[in-house]
Image (spheres, rainbow, N blue to C red):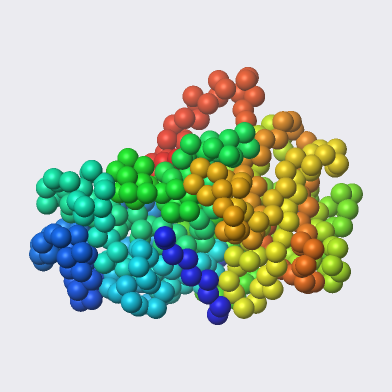
Amino acid sequence: MKQHYLALVVVTTMASTAYSQVNVWLDFNTDWVTEINKATSDAGQPNFGAIERNTIQNNILSQVQSIYSGYNISFSLTDPGGVRDRVNFGTPVSGPGAGVGVLGFAPLQVGNFSTGDEINMVPQNFAFFIDPSDGDPNDVGITRPEQIAQISRGFSGTVGHELGHSLGLNHHQAYGDPGIIPANYLNTGGLQNQHIIATGDTGLDENEDLGRESVRGFNRWERATLDITGGFTSTPGLAGLSLVNSPIAEVAEAGDAGDTFAGATPITFATGESSGMELSLRTGDLDDVTNDIDFYSFTVGSAGSLMAEVFSVNLEADQWNSFDSLLTLYDTDGTTVLATSDDLFYQNNNFLSGSTTALSFDPFLVNIPLSTAGTYYLGLNGVADNQVGDQYALLTGFVAIPEPTSLLLIAVGATAMLARSRRFGSYA
């Protein structure tokens, strides 16, 4: 299977499969001791003793359990055996896939259609969390317990981040925060960096309040992506490993999705278990003509916010024929273009044009306002140099804006929403 490694510098139906939980082994092997000692040496600090390392290990276990709270995932300090993901804490800077400045790396597995992944931590590069000479005043004059707490949070956030890649999350999804809307795409105010999949390109830095030294959570769209783990039922691989009890299952196109607005394929939403969004997962491919466009229609009962993401270049499996695509959202008149997305050039607090080179080649529509109830359209096609017969997955999500008369019902539903938030943590 071809794998892409990432590092830190119609009616949608529920599958009837009995889903198994995801097991993750936090492997603090003998190389971990060697590599963490390199970090303390580089920081000019005494090595962590066995008791201190044990504290760090248990901190990491507790904090990653908190990050993934409510999901069907089990973390262990011992090998659970069978099918499991392994987090290797003993990767040297000189190891394959590592390098100076690389905190960790993992394969990208959208939908978790493959498991048994190897996630790698590079402990020597964590020296800056406890180095008083690196320019961070929070590292100066701190006690040993504070050093242990800081480096523990640094590891926990990185483990949560890299494991997120192996479950389908990608860096640009950090911008899926509900507060990031077209009006502030050019200055997001750093909202993206409170989320687990944020990275250096999104502006994440060493910060105790909102950075690598904080234990970050998932935004709504990151949770939507986790809601489809195990959902690619037609894709070869280890099916049945899902983070939620009822993942959003793919609906594969039996034929062409429709070449016109009149012939658009209708999609229907189902509620994502952890995101609370109305979601649809479609898979299809373009016809054997270079100018083909696949049209989908969806109907909403109120105004709201629309998100949509194409997975093609980011689907790293041999059976997928990936391509560079363009996604367009049309208004209810079938003519007016509300938004388009091609390649992503995000950087720091600029979602649209912060980078001079594309950081992702799959389209991503973020919090596009829909002003009224009605039927809207999505058109998906390849760019000018696309190949024919190309395959994709399209994840669409909708969040309604309550009518004023409905606001009285919010208090009634608050108890149910509180129960959900307790299971899955914050919807930040």
Does residue 252 appear in the picture of this structure?
no
Q: Which residue is drawn at 69% across and 73% down?
A: 321
**Image location (x, y in percent) of residue 15:** 60, 61
**Image location (x, y in percent) of residue 92:** 30, 74
Q: Residue at x 23, y 43 (%)?
A: 137
Relative to residue 338, is residue 138 drawn left or right? left
- Quadrant in the picture for the C terminus: top left
Q: Residue at x 65, y 70 (%)?
A: 234
Q: Relative to residue 28, is residue 328 depicted above or below?
A: above
Does residue 7 appear in the picture of this structure?
yes
Residue 383: which quarter of the image? Answer: bottom right
Relative to residue 21, is residue 79 drawn left or right? left
Q: 241 or 43, which is in the foreground?
A: 43
Q: Relative to residue 400, is residue 246 depicted above or below?
A: below
- Number of numbered discs: 0
Relative to residue 270, is residue 242 drawn left or right? left
Relative to residue 159, is residue 186 drawn left or right? right
- Quadrant in the picture for the N terminus: bottom right
Residue 44: which quarter of the image? Answer: bottom left
Q: 11 or 227, which is in the foreground?
A: 227
**Image location (x, y in percent) of residue 269:** 67, 47
Q: Residue at x 54, y 37 (%)?
A: 187
**Image location (x, y in percent) of residue 73:** 39, 60
Q: Relative to residue 152, is residue 324 depicted above or below?
A: below
